[in-house]
Image (cartoon, grey):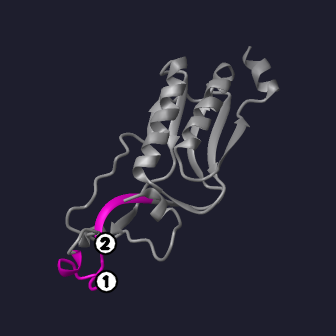
Amino acid sequence: MRGVNYREPRGMPYVRREYIKGKPQIKIARFSSGQYKDNFYEYKLELLTTEAIQIRHNALESARLAANKTMARAGDTSFFSSLRVYPHVLLRENKMIATAGADRLQEGMRRAFGKATGLAARIQPGQVVYEAYVTAQNLGLAKEAFKVASSKVGCPMLIRITPLKDASQKEEEE
């Protein structure tokens, strides 16, 4: 099974797990990491999609790991990141045998429901996939981390940077 076959969201999403034996397990280990501190971080970075797409759970996990690994170079307590999507959609595959004599072994398209092979998240254009909160000194490292994370996902992504603190708020704190 290749992710390119399931990239475009077609038809109704299949999310009813109670009807499926042998449900695939989600591969995402954590949805948030780092240390959350209220009113400490100066910038919020968001990874946005530019088109409607289905992203498989192993692609989401690899993007999260790559971004966290890059941002962890500044220290585990210097950022807070969270994955904002959850893979609900079940992906099914009707496996076909492609060897000699296979025409006598399989039934083709008869009852071709398919076996559950993975999970995916359906994402609309402009939806936030991943976000991180960083300080001003770690902003460059976070941009680099988001570039690496966007290469793990199968569509073009945008990075939106939002300053959380104004210059007037910084002067009041100092």
Residue 59 position within the rendered picture, expressed as x and y whole percent measured from the top left: 45, 48
**Circle number at residue 117:** none
Q: Quadrant of residue 139?
A: top right
Q: Quadrant of residue 168?
A: top right
Residue 155 position within the rendered picture, expressed as x and y whole percent measured from the top left: 59, 53
Identify residue for label 1. Answer: 109
Q: Quadrant of residue 134?
A: top right
Q: Is residue 5 within the magenta segment?
A: no
Q: Residue furthest right?
A: 168
Identify residue for label 2. Answer: 94
Q: Which residues are magenta?
A: 102-120
- Pointers 1 and 2 in contact (CB under 8 A)? yes
Q: Which is nearer the eye, 117 or 87?
A: 117
Q: Is residue 160 above or below residue 13?
A: above
The residue carrying pointer 2 sits among few (fewer than 14), some (14 to 19) or many (20 or more) residues within 10 Å by Cα, namely some
Q: Residue furthest left?
A: 105
Q: Residue at x 31, y 72 (%)?
A: 94
Q: Is residue 131 above or below residue 85?
A: above
